[in-house]
Image (tube, rainbow, N blue to C red):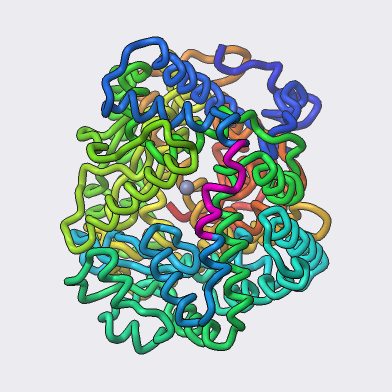
Amino acid sequence: MFIDKKNLDESISPGKDFYRYANGGWMKRNPLPPEYSRYGSFDILAEENNEKLRELIEGLSKISITPGSLEQKVHDFYTSGMDTNAIEKAGINPIRRLLDEVNSIKTKAEFLSFMIRMQAENFQYLFSFYGSVDPGKSEWVMASISQGGLGLGDVDYYTRDDDQSKAILSKYREHISKILQLSGFEKDCMNYATAILAFETSLAKVSMTRQERRDPHKQYNKMDVDELIAICPALDWRKLIKSLHLDDLKEINVSQPVFFKELSNLIDTTELETLKAWMHWTLVNKNSDFLSDKFVNAAFHFYGEYLSGKKKILPRWKRVMANANHALGEAIGELYVARYFPPESKERMLDLVSNLKESLSERIEKLSWMSAETKGKALDKLEAINVKIGYPDKWRDYEGLNINSSGYFDNTRTAYYFNYLYNLNKIGKKVDKDEWGMTPQTVNAYYSPTRNEIVFPAAILQPPFFFSDGDDAINYGAIGMVIGHELTHGFDDQGRNYDSKGNLKDWWTEKDAENFKVRTKILVDQFDSLTVHEGTRANGQLTLGENIADLGGLNIAYSALRKAWEENPPENPKEGFTPAQRFFLAYAHVWASNMTIEDMLRRTREDVHSLGQFRVNEPLRHMQEFFDAFELNEKAEMYLKPENRADIW
Ligand SMILES: [Zn+2]
């Protein structure tokens, strides 16, 4: 069964609230489990996947494994995470040496030298240093630095003064104080929590907001090392670069120059004792998941319960699995694919992608608002999009990584450090085109603007996205839409700044760029006007790229489906719905979910994706095909007059 009537709520008209019409039954039958702040059909797939991984990894205990093999590394990592006796016994010991060192610092010079050493050891707390594709020369990997230092997930928590933000900051201060107390901080914890919060607030004020960071030009500021030293003299950059074995480094991309300039001033003007307290707090906070339960639970109480509305912490094995996926992602991926990925899925996907690409190409040719000149460039870019499906052709080598029974914290640090060096080692070299940015066991997909490629990991090629025996309407509505969505990212408000080779280069005529902005502004205003909860509105600018991709994805997938029907006419109707209805129902079902109010508010600040209900209802209002499929007219609440609709891709 592909469309299950039990998932619907037929008491609601599809034209009033399609999301609830399509998912109301599902939502009632799948109440939010206490360990989750959001639970949807998407998460059920992720859960099933988790169970598969568990079976796979726990199964390794029953076979003999070669020391140094992937199996041994994965097995020992996971087992050390499940060894609660050892973890409880260790308590805070894994980081005690570092905390003692912080405590014994006597001068600011000593603090700065300690901090540089920490950064080099991948305790990257004040800022991050990494290799990434150079958007000016996309064949090459450059060194980059990015703002950091905050314990809350967004700049905006510190800088807004509405009641909700103030309440969060006050709770946050209590939480910092509690962590200081639990971890043996010997001075007045509440006073220092206040000072730490003030320091983080000063950092937040000079940081780029999430919205500003959507503009790739703003974050591309390559300078030579002397220039960086001139804007941020407080830190010993030469020493850091040397410790990272990057002695020949000439240039570095300073993603947020204002931050680094002000960071230098802030370090100069902040009292040494505050900086030390901040380092103490951050060390415990960033590592709490790998310490004893006292720390795990305190962190959950604030970040999980208070900020996201979860009632219960996830079982330990799921938390360890998430960390193992982070630390040893491709090693686990290689084992996962060998066992679970049917090669036929790849063939079917390649077909779908090529149909979707063709349909986008035809749509671009027909666009009324774009000149032939820009269309030519857009088509070149579309043609050049590289496609990766399932898993990498070449697996990553984990040779040299030592995972053993020494303990969860040590294994985690060792693996993270190994990954850090792996990343740094790419700096100054050519981009490895075979590399993946997501592991095969991830239920997700992405578009990379600097690589101009779309990537679909093996784990997403399953229901409710991909049905190996499903009809076209279902598959185009679900995975087809995801493919269209990722393709559209190449042409959203961010992606359109990059050319076919992944370079930041303006290929638009002025008039076409203007037309694009006028059209996308319709979506900004539409989403800005949506109420999330009691006076909190959605953020149209922050979610613009995703909203463009959702609308584009739906349009492209629907055009491709119509083409597929020319060759292969659909059975009409099936399971009580016409093929067109099945397309839209399959789409809506992907986003069926329940969610806490706290998480809705948190995501509204932090997530570039709109909430599921908006992702379903809002783009459909721009599609006549949707109104036709359900025989809706201007009386339907979701109806938008054709002149008010956004017609972009
Ligand atoms: Zn997206």
The image position of residue 443, as x and y in percent, is 47, 33
Specify whether residue 632 is in view: no
Looking at this view, is 437 or 187 the one in front? 187
Residue beneath the point at 35% across and 30% down: 73
Residue beneath the point at 30% across and 60% down: 131
Q: Is residue 94 magenta?
A: yes
Q: How many marks on residues?
A: 0
Task: Quadrant for the N terminus, please.
Answer: top right
Specify whether residue 523 is in view: yes
Q: Main secondary structure of the magenta part?
A: helix
87 left or right of 346 in image? right
Looking at this view, is 100 or 466 the one in front? 100
Above or below residue 212? Residue 623 is: above
Residue beneath the point at 35% across and 16% down: 339
Q: Is residue 382 magenta?
A: no
The image position of residue 350, as x and y in percent, is 28, 29
The residue range painted magenta reads 89-98
Above or below residue 601? Residue 272 is: below
Quarter where residue 515 is shown:
bottom left
Quarter where residue 68 is shown:
top left
266 left or right of 230 in image? right
Looking at this view, is 47 or 556 the one in front? 47
Quarter where residue 236 is shown:
bottom left
The image position of residue 472, as x and y in percent, is 43, 22
Residue beneath the point at 66% across and 50% down: 640
Above or below residue 233? Residue 487 is: above
Above or below residue 410? Residue 348 is: above
Looking at this view, is 537 or 360 the one in front? 537
557 left or right of 632 in image? left
The image position of residue 28, as x and y in percent, is 77, 25
